[in-house]
Image: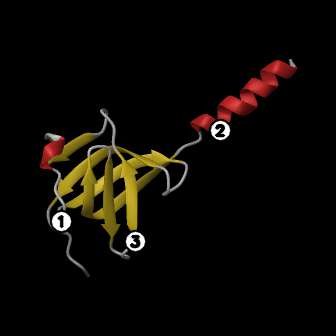
Amino acid sequence: IGVIVLVALTVGPAFAHDNFRIIGTVTRLQKTLIDVKNADGKTVNIKLDKQTAVTRDKKKVDAAELKTGLSVVVDAYGDSEADLLALEIRIVPPITKR
């Protein structure tokens, strides 16, 4: 029974990821990383992988369409904003300041 408890305690936290939504402008783009600057001026580094979907107008597009300066909405998950993996990146019309 002690082994089962130990396994449950070590496996449980591995699945405790939170969902995040980052809205902003692409400031840097690499093959496996995107930096997005939000409205507060904070830049968030987000990892990309083969499963990251890139869309525009609800249609899947190639990741090569991502460029610096584009406005995006990124749905990601991770333990914190410092450790995020992008699930979907939506290219959206330019975001205007209020």
Residue 23 horizontal/vertical position (percent)? 31, 62
Q: Is residue 7 above or below residue 66?
A: above
Question: Which badge, 1 or 3, is on the more N-terminal residue?
Answer: 3
Kind of residue sitting beneath label 2? Pro
Pick out the residue farthest to the front: 30
Residue 13's disc is 2
Q: Is residue 96 above or below residue 36?
A: below
Rendered residue at 40%/71% (across/down): 42
Q: Nearer the viewer, residue 52 or 60?
A: 52
Pick out the residue farthest to the right: 2
Image quadrant for the C terminus?
bottom left
Residue 1 horizontal/vertical position (percent)? 86, 17
Query: Which residue does the numbered mark 3 point to in the structure image?
Result: 42
Rendered residue at 74%/24% (across/down): 7
Query: Are the residues at dot 2 and dot 1 in contact (C-beta closer than 8 Å)?
Result: no
Q: Nearer the viewer, mark 2 or mark 3?
A: 3
Residue 18 horizontal/vertical position (percent)? 52, 48
Q: Nearer the viewer, mark 2 or mark 1?
A: 1
Pick out the residue farthest to the bottom: 98
Query: Which residue does the numbered mark 1 point to in the structure image?
Result: 69
* Numbered disc 2: secondary structure: helix
